[in-house]
Image: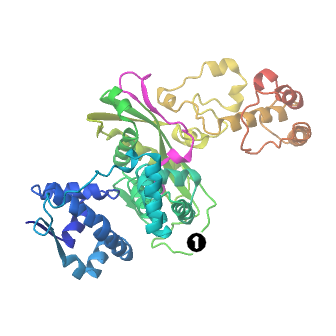
Amino acid sequence: MEKFTISNNELVEVIQSCSTDANVEDYINEIKIKCPNTSENMLHKLRERLRKTFLPTFNQKWTAAKRTMDVFRNKNIDWLNKTFTIELGGSEPSSSSSKRVGRPEKAFEDCSSRAKRYKIQHVKENVSEDIIVAAASSINRASDTKEGFSAEKALALMLDADLSKHQYEIIRDAAKAIGHDIYPPYYKILEAKKQCYPSNLTVTEKGAENDLQSLLDHTSTRIVKTLNSEHLEKMDNNITLVYKWGCDGSSGHSEYKQNFSRDGIKDSNLFLTTLVPLRLRNKDNKDLIYWQNSRPSSTRFCRPIRFEFEKESDDVTKTENARMERAIERLVETQIEAGGKVFKVEHVLILTMVDGKVVQTLQNTPGMNTCSHCKATPTQMNKLHTVRNLVIKDEDLPFNIPSLHARIKFMECSLHISYRQTFLKWRIDKENKKVYGAEKIRIQGQLQRKLGIKVDFVKVGIRSFNDGNTAETASITGVSEELIS
């Protein structure tokens, strides 16, 4: 007689060693590794025991323990120490005595339509309707779970739809009620969410900071692992991930009653440094792109590097820029194993997520009216022969012209030119101050009456003047249509 004895505690350890989305077959495979001499008949008996008796009891106790292993073990010590034995042979009938007499029974799918109707009628007459419905729902749930949402896909769904935990659970319960258990439980989404966090995170009462190398390692690894095997096969082993980064301050935040241990810290101001991955490409061939950020201006792809309760100032901006430059110089390649290959990822960070104020500070420009690149003053800008002879330093070139707020600033520039059309001077003095104010009110009023737009403040949605309203705008403002275009 063949016997197999195992304790509940050993089975719990098997479940722990498997992934969170494992099933009965995964547990059986793990037992095969630990007990290689176990026969297939014994494993079949054990599989049935797990499915019908052990796993329902375990799941009930695991839920009662709030899915915490320490609590689970403390509450179920006696149950964990219990063992059960599975026996084969002995009392089982021999093959000769169990041999069926008469015509062999066909599988249901091989039967004729008439035979199927007979079998269905036999089940309906001998089994209650509630049991049949429950069995059908159980089969549907088992089938749907295999093709349902993974924890990562469910997390992405929650983010795309901006679902709260309560809303997600309502949708999940509604799907389960009609026999489609396609959404994973919320605790698995939390586990998937934890996989999105990089390591080496430093948090203080004044702010928080991600180690730059750890953040880039984590970001590149997650991006590479989203690619399918076909993409990975075509990719070269040496690749480059290009990012944009920048820093900016914001103020006017709510101040809370919680006190800080140090003086001088206020939560009304915030200074933030972030980066966004843009493109994964071949290291040698820049035109060979493997992954492209489809929404480079979305906050979804924005990765915080550091934030601090600090008011934006020239010193703060310069200190943060110097700190980032040192961190970028220390960066090393990231090695990623995926699709049976080892990829070496080089990180390239470009400072473009900056506004005019940050550029002015980093390039030591005396004022916002002065060009950050050639240092031309408003007086010099009207003298084209002087501007052409100004020298642009090499260290100023990497900043280029920041694209942040570009369209809004071009719109404001056109308006400010139009306000000065009568006296043709950029500087507003006492003589032309009233003329400037009157012209501004006149142009604002005409733009609102004729085009229905309010101007001279940041208006979300302004795309370009180069549309059907261009000629009308030019006639109202008095600015050249060619210049506006």
461 horizontally vs 86: left or right: right
In the rendered view, tell whether residue 108 sits above or below residue 393.
Answer: below
| Residue 120 drawn at (x, y percent) | 46, 57
| Residue 422 x, y percent position in the rendering | 88, 30
Q: Quadrant of residue 442?
A: top right
Vertical relation: 209 (above or below) 291: below
The residue identified by callout 1 is 256
Front residue (pair 102, 485):
102
Amino acid at circle 1: Tyr
Q: Residue furthest front?
A: 102
Residue 31 seen from this side: no
Q: Which residues are magenta?
A: 281-307
Q: Nearer the viewer, residue 9 or 207?
A: 9
Tell me where residue 396 appears, x and y as whole percent: 51, 30
Tell me: 270 left or right of 456.
left
Which quadrant of the rendered structure holds the N terminus? bottom left
**Camera-nearest residue between 323 and 350:** 350
219 above or below 2? above
Which residue is located at x 59 percent, y 54 percent?
250
